[in-house]
Image (spheres, rainbow, N blue to C red):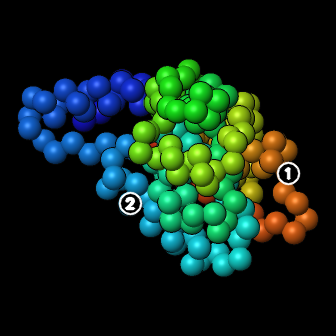
Amino acid sequence: MVGGDRYQDALVASEAYVEQSGALAIHAFDQPETLIGQATLGKEIEEDVPGITTLLVAVGGGGLIGGIAAWLRGRVKIVAVESDGAPTLHEAFRAGHPVDAAAGGIAADSLAPKRVGELMFPFAQRYVEQPLLVTDDEIRAAQKALWSGARLVAEPGGAAAFAALLSGKYVPAADEKVCVLVCGSNTTAVDFG
């Protein structure tokens, strides 16, 4: 079920639909099966990019980074990247548990639930670096760079991890082999000029 402008709106709409219709509910990031499915991406990255030392991943509810962290279990440094308008994991790290956080910014349709998932949080605490926060302007610049450099159209949430690298919020060491995960599909035709 689709509804609203932000993840939380869509979640409420889908929960109402499940209640009314009896449909099977599958949570986008806080369900064991979702984390297990996302862990397969960690496996694929490890197989396809041997020798990486660092992986930058955008965070919303945390299902993707939680699944990847559960698979990699410290074999690769995982750096979380969030929009400064939706710092869900940043606030959870600060509190020591998932808490409600701001839910705004250019990437709000994919990276702005109220809070990160309960199931992913122990994996994040153990295997994920302190989140880096990027601005809307940095995300837009990353989208443009991905388009001009690789002809890759990325939604704002999908470009957030690259924004950390492009903006200098993450500066790799000389010996690091960095992989940036560009994810998501919430985009329409974009004119980058």
Q: Give the percent coordinates (x, y) of residue 104.
A: 56, 22
Q: Quadrant of the C terminus?
A: top right
Q: Quadrant of the N terminus?
A: top left
* Residue at 41% in and 45% down: 119
* Whether residue 84 is visible: yes
Name the secondary structure under disc 1.
Answer: loop
Q: Give the percent coordinates (x, y) of residue 181.
A: 61, 57
On screen, residue 134 versus residue 41, left or right, reads right
Q: Is residue 127 above or below residue 140?
A: below
Mark 1 burial class by Cα count in 10 Å: few <14, some 14-19, many 20+:
few
Q: Find the residue positioned furthest to the right.
A: 174
- Residue type at tag 1: Val
- Choose between 88 and 135: the one closer to the eye: 88
Disc 2 target residue: 36
Marks 2 & 1, CB-CB < 8 Å contact: no
- Choose between 154 and 14: the one closer to the eye: 14
* Residue at 50% in and 26% down: 99
On screen, residue 117 versus residue 15, left or right, reads right
Q: Give the percent coordinates (x, y) of residue 58.
A: 60, 46
Mark 2–mark 1 distance (CA, rounded to whole Å): 30 Å
Residue 115, disc: none
Q: Give the percent coordinates (x, y) of residue 82.
A: 63, 37
- Choose between 117 and 25: the one closer to the eye: 117
- Residue type at tag 2: Ile
Name the secondary structure under disc 2.
Answer: helix
Q: How many circles with numbers are drawn on the protein?
A: 2
Disc 1 target residue: 171
Q: Is residue 148 above or below residue 85?
A: below
Q: Earlier along the polypeptide chain: callout 2 or callout 1?
A: 2
Q: Say which of marks 2 and 1 sits in front.
A: 2
